[in-house]
Image (cartoon, helix red, strand yellow):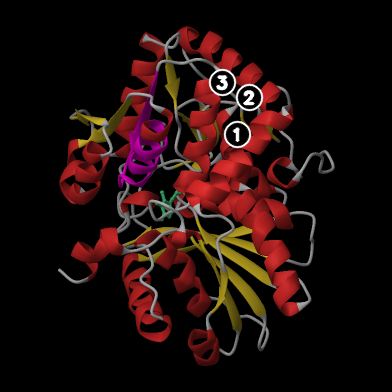
Amino acid sequence: MDTPRGGVLFSLFMTPSSTGRFGCFGGSFVPETLIEPLLELEAAYASARRDPKFRAALKNELATYVGRPTPLTFAGRLSAALGLRVWLKREDLTHTGAHKINNTVGQVLLALRMKKKRVIAETGAGQHGVATAAAAARAGLPCVVYMGTDDMARQAPNVARMKMLGATVVAVTSGLKTLKDATSEALRAWSADSRETFYVLGSALGPHPYPTMVRDFQSVIGFEARAQILKEEGRLPAHVIACVGGGSNAIGIFTAFLKDRKVALTGVEAGGTGLGPGKHAARFAGGAPGTLHGTYTYLLQDKNGQVLPTHSISAGLDYPAVGPEHAELRRIGRATYAHASDQQAVKAAHELCRLEGILPALESSHALAYLHKARFGKNAIVIVNLSGRGDKDLGTLCP
Ligand SMILES: *Cc1c(COP(=O)(O)O)cnc(C)c1O
């Protein structure tokens, strides 16, 4: 493991090996046709992250378009109810309403630098699709988003937003018609035209260099939060909590705290309606190592290695694999992983609305639910990453 280097945006604790391994996890397990494009992307990103001009452009875009830094809000009434000091990192206040935009703005700047002619993306809940469509429109690049037809029905408002932002939404009808199938379709489309196309991947997942690149773009969350809590409380938090779908908002807030050994890091997965097969997306509770979409990581699979269906009330956590860096952080004991059920997440969403006047995304509500599930020291300082806002979930929260 390397020591941190570079500026705030790119200083890293865990640098993967040249093949993109985090311990035994990660790597790049792809068909022949994707090897060249991934090497090209790796080289372009390595050069961009060292280039002061690229970093300045990204910093400017984050400040003036995304709305960074986001506030760290003290949740006074929730804190009183729990006997804690709870601080919320407000990614819900970013442009388009979730942390996804931190990553899409970075990747689209890279697409421009690589002189690509169009961008493509996969999306589940539609948040990554909306964030990609927005960044692409601003860059003047055409954008195609792959989305399962089941998700299109569940998340109709985000389909409308993507179209309004000029993106073409391609309906994916294969498999379970959700995120896994949309991702497979986007990877296929990329391998068919990688010379002109940039694939904007939405989480800290997929083949190298994506897990590293997405982590780097999201690490701004944690570096801001760390400076903010030191200013507000004069010390580091006892605990940092984030929900884990692919793991990008969690790794985004964890990275800045990795070297602070006394800060406990917890990722919360989707416990769904129970831990039986097909009822959840808690990869660390019910999964085993395997390969999906180019990376070796914890995966929900049957005994023959067939990927299992998943369920979560939050579409953004409903995916059978977890980012490979999380698998390694868990293995070395630096982070722990828990899960919250659909019902616990819904309850936590209502609680935050009533106590703090903030409507959280159902994904983020899994992290909030953990506050009720764990034991903390009295008045312990806890930061919860509020990864997005919950307007998109109103249909589920109050049908
Ligand atoms: C997409 C999404 C997530 C899950 O993705 P990660 O890569 O695990 O962060 C969590 N919260 C919100 C609001 C999302 O839109």
Residue at label 2? Answer: 45
Whole-angstrom CA distance, mark 3 to mark 2, is: 10 Å
**Vertical placement of residue 296 versus 373, above or below:** above
Q: Quick one: which residue is furthest to the right in this view? A: 3
Q: Residue at 45% across / 32% down in the picture?
A: 201
Labelled pair 3, 2 in contact (Cβ < 8 Å): no
Q: Earlier in the sequence, mark 1 or mark 2?
A: 2
* Magenta highlight on residue 133: yes
Which of the two labelled residues, at mark 3 and mark 1, occupies the earlier sequence position? Answer: 3
Q: Residue 213 shows which numbered tag?
A: 1
Q: Give how far across and how far down residue 207 sits, in percent.
A: 54, 26
Quarter of the view holding residue 340: bottom left
Q: Mark 3 points at which residue?
A: 113
Name the amino acid type tagged 3.
Arg
At numbered mark 1, what does the secondary structure look like: helix, strand or loop? helix
What residue type is disc 1 on? Met
Q: Check if mark 1's residue and mark 2's residue have beta carbons within 8 Å.
A: yes
Report the side of 186 relative to 200 (left or right).
left
Q: Distance between the residues labelled 3 and 1?
A: 15 Å
- Residue 265 percent location from the top left of the image: 65, 62
Q: Which residue is drawn at 34% across and 62% down?
A: 274
Q: Which numbered disc, 3 or 2, marks the residue closer to the eye? A: 3
User: Is residue 22 shown left or right of residue 99?
Assistant: right
- For the magenta stretch, what is the residue range? 118-136
Tag 1: Cα neighbours inside 10 Å, few (<14), some, or many (≥20)? many
Spatial CA distance of label 1 from label 2 is 8 Å
Residue in front for this viewpoint, 90 or 206: 90
Q: Which of 70 and 176 is in front in this view?
A: 70
